[in-house]
Image (cartoon, grey):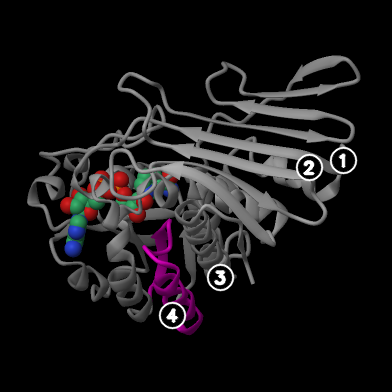
C-alpha cells in the first residue's frame, strides 16, 4: 500500500484525493493546505469536468492534517507526495518535495516560466524518488488512443490535426492573477500544447494569435505548430467563454484514410469517419486523472521511471507555451531550437 500525502486541497487536490480513496494501491496518509477551511472541508473548490472535485476531506479520519507543506514532506509515514498547489508555487514546493526523497507527483504546468521548469526538470533528475508531472491528457480515454493511431499509422499519415479546449474562467484569486496562473495559455491550453508534443514531437516554430481578457496574461489563444512532416497542426484554448457555457474539449484529426473526431459535448464523444461511414468508437467512462495516478502508483510499485510523461517533456511544454505567448506579443512566427 502506497501512503500518499496531498498538498493543496483545491480543485485538483480534491480530484486526486477522490482517486486515491478509490484506488486499491494507495492509502491517504496526510493532507495539507495553508487555508484551515480547505483543510477541514469547510470551503470547497469545483472542477471543469462532471464528477471532478467531488471529494469531501471531512470523510477522512485517521489522516494527518498539516498547514505547512514542509511538515508533510518531512513525515516519515509518507511514501509519495502529490503537489496540487497553484502554479507559481510549483518551483519552490516541487523542489522541496523532490529533495525529501519521496516519490513526487506534481501538477501541470511544471512551472510558471520555462526557466523555472528547467530547474524542476533538473531537480527531478537528482531526485531519489520517482517523479510524474500530471499531464493528464496523455492518459485520457480517446486521446491516448489517438496518439497510438498517429504513431502506428493505422489510418495512414496525418494531414491535419486540430485541438480545441474552451471554458469559462474558473474564478478565484489564483486564476484571476495572470502573473501567478499564466492565463488560459499556460493553465488550460497547455493540455493541448503538451498533447501536440506527445503526438508529433517539438515543432520547428509556432505562430499564435490571442488576447488578454480576464487576466493580464493570454486568456484566448490559437496556435499553428509547424512541422516538416505534418502539413497542418493547430490548437485553440480559452477560458473567456460567457457564464453558462459548458466546458468542452475536442479534436479533429484527418488522416490519409480516415477522419477521427472527438467532442466531449456528444453522448458518444469519439467518431471515426472512413469509406463513407461514421462509426462510434467506445471510450472508457473514466477520467484520465484516474489512469495517470494508477500509472504512477504502478511505476512506484515496480520501481520503474515513468516514460509516458517525463519532467523534460513537461519542461518542453512550458517552453512551447512561452514561445506561443511570445508569438502573440510580437505578431510573428517564433522558432524553437
Ligand atoms: N491537470 C488538470 O487538468 C488540472 C486542472 C486544474 C488545475 N490544475 C493545476 O493544479 C494546480 C492547482 O490548481 P487548483 O485549481 O487546485 O487551485 P486552487 O486555487 O483551487 O487550490 C490551491 C490550493 O492550494 C492551497 N495553497 C496555496 N498556497 C499554499 C501553501 N503555501 N501551502 C499549502 N497550501 C497552499 C490553497 O489554499 C488552495 O486550497 C495548478 O497548477 C493548476 O494549473 C490542473
Give the mark, 4 or 3, whose residue is nearer the N terminus: 4
Q: Secondary structure at mark 3?
A: helix
Residue 268, quarter of picture: top right
For disc 1, the neighbor class at 10 Å (few under 14, some 14 to 19, many from 20) is few
Q: Residue at x 39, y 64 (%)?
A: 111
127 part of magenta stretch: yes
Give the mark, 1 or 2, whose residue is nearer the N terminus: 2
What is the magenta range? Answer: 102-128
Instruction: Quote the CA–CA distance across marks 4 and 2.
Output: 33 Å
Q: Secondary structure at mark 2?
A: helix
- Quarter holding the C terminus? bottom right
Drawn side of residue 157 relative to residue 227, left or right: right
Q: Residue at x 14, y 41 (%)?
A: 41
Please say whether residue 85 is visible from this viewpoint.
no
Residue nearer the viewer, 96 or 298: 96
Numbered circle sitting on residue 312: 3
Q: Secondary structure at mark 4?
A: helix
Residue nearer the viewer, 279 or 55: 279
According to the image, label 2 marks what residue?
A: 149
Give the mark, 4 or 1, whose residue is nearer the N terminus: 4
According to the image, label 4 marks what residue?
A: 123
**Residue contact between numbered discs 4 and 1, judged by CB atoms under 8 Å:** no
Most extreme residue toward the front, as rendered? 331
Residue 42: x, y in percent? 10, 39
Q: Residue at x 31, y 35 (%)?
A: 169
Amino acid at each position: 500500500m502506497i501512503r500518499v500525502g496531498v498538498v493543496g486541497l483545491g480543485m485538483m487536490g480534491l480530484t486526486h484525493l477522490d482517486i486515491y480513496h478509490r484506488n486499491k494501491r494507495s492509502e491517504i496518509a496526510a493532507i495539507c493546505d495553508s487555508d484551515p477551511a480547505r483543510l477541514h472541508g469547510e470551503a470547497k473548490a469545483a472542477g471543469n469536468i462532471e464528477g471532478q472535485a467531488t471529494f469531501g476531506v471531512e470523510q477522512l479520519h485517521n489522516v494527518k492534517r498539516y498547514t505547512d507543506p514542509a511538515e508533510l514532506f518531512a513525515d516519515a509515514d509518507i511514501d509519495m507526495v502529490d503537489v496540487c498547489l497553484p502554479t507559481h508555487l510549483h518551483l519552490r514546493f516541487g523542489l522541496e518535495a523532490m529533495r525529501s526523497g519521496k516519490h513526487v507527483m506534481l501538477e501541470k504546468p511544471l512551472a510558471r516560466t520555462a526557466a523555472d521548469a528547467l530547474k524542476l526538470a533538473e531537480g527531478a533528475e537528482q531526485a531519489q524518488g520517482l517523479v510524474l508531472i500530471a499531464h493528464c491528457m496523455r492518459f485520457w480515454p480517446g486521446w491516448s488512443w489517438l496518439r497510438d493511431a498517429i504513431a502506428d499509422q493505422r489510418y495512414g499519415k496525418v494531414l491535419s490535426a486540430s485541438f480545441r479546449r474552451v471554458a469559462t474562467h474558473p474564478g478565484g484569486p489564483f486564476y484571476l492573477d495572470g502573473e501567478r496562473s499564466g492565463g488560459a495559455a499556460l493553465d488550460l491550453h497547455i493540455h493541448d500544447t503538451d498533447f501536440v508534443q506527445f503526438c508529433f514531437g517539438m515543432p520547428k516554430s509556432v505562430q499564435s494569435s490571442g488576447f488578454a481578457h480576464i487576466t493580464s496574461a493570454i486568456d484566448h489563444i490559437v496556435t499553428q505548430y509547424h512541422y516538416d512532416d505534418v502539413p497542418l497542426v493547430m490548437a485553440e484554448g480559452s477560458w473567456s467563454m460567457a457564464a453558462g457555457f459548458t466546458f468542452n474539449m475536442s479534436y479533429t484529426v484527418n488522416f490519409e484514410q480516415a477522419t477521427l473526431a472527438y467532442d466531449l459535448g456528444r453522448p458518444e464523444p469519439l467518431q471515426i469517419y472512413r469509406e463513407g461511414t461514421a462509426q462510434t468508437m467506445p471510450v472508457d467512462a473514466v477520467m484520465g486523472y484516474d489512469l495517470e495516478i494508477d500509472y504512477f502508483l504502478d511505476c512506484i510499485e515496480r520501481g520503474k521511471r515513468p516514460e509516458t510523461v517525463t519532467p523534460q517533456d513537461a519542461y518542453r511544454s512550458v517552453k512551447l507555451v512561452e514561445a506561443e505567448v511570445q508569438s502573440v506579443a510580437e505578431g510573428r512566427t517564433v522558432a524553437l531550437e
